[in-house]
Image (cartoon, rainbow, N blue to C red):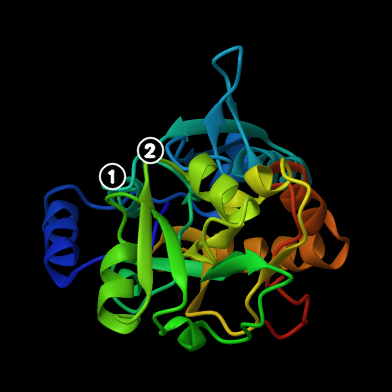
Amino acid sequence: MRLTRRFTLAACALVAAALVAAPATARTLDEILADGTLRVGVNPTLPPLALFDDENELAGFDVDFATKIAEMMGVELELTQVGSPDRIPFVASGRIDFVMGAMTRTSERAKVIDFTVPAHTEVFGVLTTQDKPYTDWRELNTADVTMVQVRGTTPIAFIEENLPEAEVLLLDNYPDVVRALAQGRGDAMLDVVDFVGELMAGHDVEWKVVETPVDIYYCSLGIAKGNYTLRDWLNVALYELHRTGFTDETWRKWFGMDMIYPVQASPYF
């Protein structure tokens, strides 16, 4: 689970220095079409965005999404496994054509790479049950609220700073946390809620995501700086995927729930 995915100024400087030593060789749309292969980076450490299936093949939301984009482009898909530290250098140096894997658009990252319009969102917010009255995450800052969290995760520091009055019950993993909420042993969990949809489906309770989230992350496709022909085509493709419902259907398939804050298919987005 991830609270933030900050790309610091120092990291930007390191990537920029690397690019000076190894000039970018990003392929334009025409070059990708001529080659007949689209190279996409996905991160299998962020399931269900990407993961290794029972046959040790890459699968997940990002894989299905990239497969559809390659199909629309009329080329073959070539997947590359990337991790959080190397995904931006890979795309900035042209080793891949675009990268997925929860690529939140930030002003710091935009100094190094370009972004498409959003492919999906992620909500850093509060999961609770329908019998609880909360409508805003700030309402949890009271001694009669017990937050159930995974031991060692970054939301704990956020709770200590912003919800200091709340009690905190720490457990070892996310299945245990969701089970504790379902059993009434705690009142709420604060995290990136989208990634526990499959766990929620395993309990016969009425879940609720508190209406006012802490933050909404808008995740896009990351491409090399200045690769406008590819970016512009991808923006049109993303609009079609949102408009036709493909994005929402694929999200439900892998996350076991609707996207909490779906991307709107506006012609100006």
Relative image position of residue 156 (x, y in whole percent): 31, 64
- Circle 1: element type: loop
The reply to whether residue 114 is in sight is yes
Q: Residues within 10 Å of mark 2 (few under 14, many from 20)?
A: many
Residue 251 tag number = none
Q: Quadrant of residue 240?
A: bottom right
**For the residues bearing labels 1 and 2, Cβ distance under 8 angstroms:** yes
Q: Which residue is mark 1?
A: 86
For the residue marked with disc 1, what is the amino acid? Asp
Quadrant housing residue 119: bottom right
221 horizontally vs 171: left or right: right
- Does dot 2 land on a helix, a strand or a loop? loop
Q: Residue furthest right?
A: 244
Q: CA distance from mark 1 to mark 2?
A: 6 Å
Front residue (pair 67, 245):
245
Residue for point 41% across, 84% down: 141
Please name the residue shown 31% across and 49% down the image.
151
Q: Which residue is mark 2?
A: 82
The image position of residue 48, as x and y in percent, is 58, 41
Looking at the rendered structure, the kind of residue marked 2 is Val
In the rendered view, tell whether residue 210 sits above or below residue 99. Answer: below
